Amino acid sequence: MALMALLSCSVSLFAQSAPGLDKAKIEAYVRHLLLWTPQITVTVADPLPGPLPGFQEVKVTGSYQQASLDEIFYVSLDGTKIVRGNVYDVDKSPFASELSKLKTDLQPSLGTPGAKVVIVAFSDFQCGYCKEEAKMLRTNLLQTYPKDVRLYFKDFPIEQIHPWAKAASLAGRCVFRQKPAAFWDFHDWIFEKQAEVTPENIKAKLGEWVQSKGLDAMQFTRCYDTRATEAEINRNLAEGRQLRVNSTPTLFINGRMVPGAVPWQQLKAIIDMEIDYAKRHPESGEKCCELTLPIPGKK
């Protein structure tokens, strides 16, 4: 939501228009369609082959400061018609595109490897709604589904409104590097102490917590001070933007996007539907011991 509030537009065109694609015309049309005002920088990418005969895929990106948002359009070869929406292949999962973008290797996780339901959570340690959802997941998920669900955590700090969120993500990743199982202790602790943390005291509080857990304080401090884990967080942010994540918390349940804080009973209903789907589609879910999400229906 903060991203959408910021995206209001100024444009710069970085490449010459490809034959049949008038980038300036596309940009002007999209600005009017999406109410992107001159504060936002708009970039129209070169066209790619599209999923529909006679149409090419064009990505249009709106950027403002550190925020960006991608929109995908399908433009006719003569440039006169634009289609905005999703194109589905009935022989594949309707969430195949999302699954292909989700990368779970080297991410903190809980649950059974090879589970039929994979949940990927994009979260922000300073977000109040993320705190409530995290508590709900930790209380209910594995207790209700000890074997059927695997949860992955991805950092998505929104620095524009949460000034210490990225620092907390840096710390969490440093903990994960040193002792993967301790990440979830950190996860629970930082959310619990959310109201007490400030940009000024976060380093001191982190140091106290690291010592209380018997972790190597020197190794942690070196990792945190050099921002050694920043590239990992930036990759998660880029992945989230590619998946059109613009608020936290956002879950992907077997590729299905579920934005916002969702009550447990509603979330449970979605999980139960995915488990039922897996019974009829044995290839769905996570293949054991692979590091990326599979696409249901893919041979």
Image (cartoon, rainbow, N blue to C red):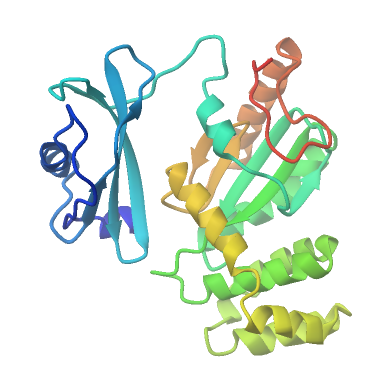
Question: On the picture, is 86 further left or further right than 186?
Answer: left
For the residue pair 48 and 147, the one nearer the viewer reads as 48
Tell me, yes or no, if residue 6 can be seen here.
Answer: yes
Q: Position of residue 26 (x, y in %)?
A: 16, 36
In the rendered image of this protein, does residue 168 appear above or below residue 235?
below
Q: Residue at x 45, y 64 (%)?
A: 158
Front-lying residue, 163 or 47: 47
Residue 67 pos. (x, y %): 36, 60
Residue at position x 34%, y 15% from top? Answer: 52
Looking at the rendered image, the quarter that the C terminus falls into is: top right
Is residue 269 depicted above or below 41 in this figure?
Answer: above
Q: Is residue 170 above or below residue 258?
A: below
User: Is 49 situated left or right of 156 in this image?
Assistant: left
In the figure, residue 33 lies in which quadrant? top left
- Whether residue 256 is visible to the viewer of this picture, yes or no, is no
Q: How many discs appear?
A: 0
Q: Quadrant of residue 39?
A: bottom left
Q: Is residue 15 left or right of residue 147?
A: left
Q: Position of residue 272 (x, y in %)?
A: 68, 25
From the viewer's perspective, tell me whether residue 97 is left or right of residue 8.
right
Image coordinates for residue 107, horizontal then vertical, percent: 71, 52
Q: Is residue 76 above or below residue 220?
A: above
Question: What residue is shown at x 30% (from left), y 47% (from top)?
Answer: 61
Residue at position x 61%, y 76% in the image = 227
In the image, 77 versus 278, the foreground residue is: 77
